[in-house]
Amino acid sequence: MNLYTNISSNIRKTWLLMSIFLILIVGVGYWLSYTYDSPGILVVAVIFSISTSLISYWYSDKIILGLNKAQEIKKSDNPELYRLVENLCITAGLPTPKIFILNEDAPNAFATGRNPQHAVIAVTRGLLEKMDKAELEGVIAHELSHIGNRDMLLQTVVVILVGVLTMACNLFFRLSFYGGNRRNSSSDREGSQATAIFFVLGLIAVILAPILAKLLSLAISRKREFLADSSGAMLTRYPEGLASALEKIAVDSTPLTVANPAMAHLYISSPFQSQQKIGWLAKLFMTHPPMEERIRILRQMNT
């Protein structure tokens, strides 16, 4: 395996998952529109989900930084860190993001912002203290890769898709509970077996769709972590730096006191990794790939 094949593989897998996501939404939307003879159900869900998600996307950096109690620093506060970020940005062809520090002992980092021109990188004090230069460079390169790969935009699209599906399914159950105007033609009343089967299969799909949507969104998040690992390693041309950093983060049990489950996917490593059990079912609900797998893949790469 090399960096280029790993990057291509993760991009393909991401778009495959997105395609499955879209097919799921179209299928559920078609079934709901057919069952209630009203395309308006999906339109309402789409408008609501897009509106709330775009507002969140536009102000996501301020919300996330505030919740994490991050403090912006200037170049004079930490010239070495700034030079490291600036040099990597020049190599990556990205504008230099604002840099924030979290006053936390746990080694971790995240990137946010709606586009490269409004990007932010935040690192914990623990990361700066516990990593050597090559390891810190690997972590920063990983976060810059999230920015360069437009992962914030992709994550917003995924949130919108999950929202559309969840809203549509909730509307279905509300309409069912209050006796909505479900399609009920004379041929249906006469016991059309095909229609009955169609309705039952659709009902099962509507019940399972939100769960499947969540699993797909988590799978996409994990693939983007693999992609950021590979892209970051290509940026530094030194996969071992990031692998070593992840190894240190994995064995560090210091809690991240500002950790929030809703933002766990943003960090380079889940703040709740020590609480997660690594079984096949647990893996489906993880925001990040298992750390051992990430480290193994990085160390298999050659530049």
Image: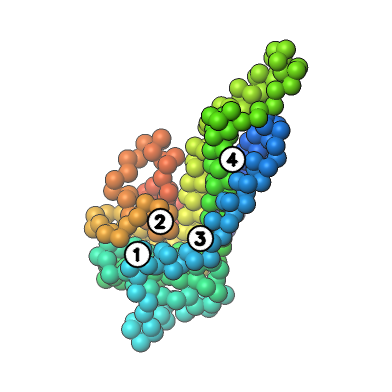
The residue where tag 4 is placed is 168
In the rendered structure, the answer to whether residue 113 lies left or right of residue 41 reads: left
Q: Amino acid at mark 3?
A: Ser
The residue where tag 1 is placed is 68
| Marks 1 and 2, the one that precedes in the sequence | 1
Relative to 111, is 99 above or below?
A: below
Q: Are marks 1 and 2 in contact (CB under 8 Å)?
A: yes
- Please state which of residues 145 and 1 is positioned toward the viewer in this rendering: 145
Report, in whole angstroms, how far the alpha carbon at label 4 lies from the one at label 2: 25 Å
| Marks 1 and 4, the one that precedes in the sequence | 1
Residue at the location (32% across, 57% down)? 259
Q: Amino acid at mark 4?
A: Ala
The residue where tag 3 is placed is 56
Residue 36, how many percent across, how many down?
A: 67, 32
Report, in whole angstroms, how far the alpha carbon at label 1 lies from the one at label 2: 9 Å
Report, in whole angstroms, how far the alpha carbon at label 3 lies from the one at label 4: 20 Å
Looking at the image, the residue that sits furthest to the top is 190
Q: Are marks 1 and 3 in contact (CB under 8 Å)?
A: no
Residue 16, how many percent across, how many down?
A: 62, 45
Label 1 crowd (10 A; few <14 / some 14-19 / many >=20): many
